[in-house]
Image: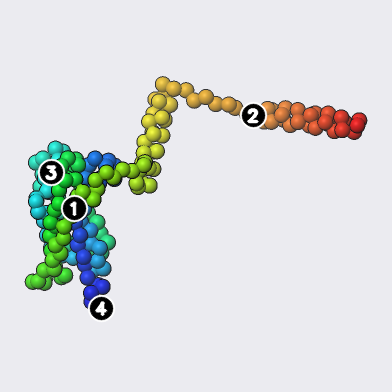
Amino acid sequence: MADLSARPQIVASIIPNQWSTIHLDVQVENTGNASAFEIEISFDPPLENGEAREDRVIPFEQISVLKPGQVLQSYLSGVGDYLKQKFTVTASWKLHPDATERENLVYTLNMSDYQGISYLGSRDPVVQIAEQIKKLRDDWRYVASGSRKIKTDVHTSDDRRREQEALEKQYQRNKDKSEEK
């Protein structure tokens, strides 16, 4: 039982991109509790790159090592026809770099699981922070370049003194009125 819990488990999938749900990423993750070596990933039917990746190889078909909990993720393509496909995913790996035997995992990845999915705002707090920082940068750019002025309301110690005197006069008037009654 202890030997089984201290093993790697390699899972490859195609997931919505964190920045845009109309784009997909390929992701490989070691969900087990040990490192995996000489990992080989294949999808049947084979994955196809999107326009932005036309002349590149599909990422993560071969990985030298994945530590426990390590995730590798890369842009793959726009959604296109992917949501209509079903893939047979084969992941194989070695338990030790010198091992001769390979562990295998074969499973079906049904992309229709993502059909009709939508999100309200960002799914990832880091993305939300990045979006807010971008808005701040865009707003501040005009001030920093001098094309917009900052409106300031200066409140000096003389202003504070006059305000305090006015409050004291108001207090005294209210006190005098209440004593007359």
What is the number of the mark on residue 156? 2
Query: What residue is at 80 percent from the left and 32 percent from the top?
Result: 171
The C terminus appears in which quarter of the rendering? top right
The answer to whether residue 76 of the structure is visible from this angle is: no
The percent position of residue 87, horizontal first and vertical second, equals 13, 53
Distance Cα–Cα, label 4 vs label 1 = 31 Å
Number of numbered labels in the structure image: 4
Instruction: Measure the C-alpha gap from mark 2 to mark 3.
Output: 63 Å
Image location (x, y in percent) of residue 169: 80, 28
Residue 165 drawn above or below residue 101: above
Front position among marks 2 and 3: 3
Task: Bin the neighbour count of mark 1 within 10 Å (Cα to Cα): few under 14, some 14-19, many 20 and up.
Answer: some
Give the residue number, with chain letter if any, for mark 1.
110
The mark found on residue 49 in the picture is 3
> What separation in Å lies between label 2 and label 4 (alpha carbons)?
74 Å
Above or below, 31 relative to 23 = below
Q: Secondary structure at mark 2?
A: loop
Residue at which label 4 appears: 1
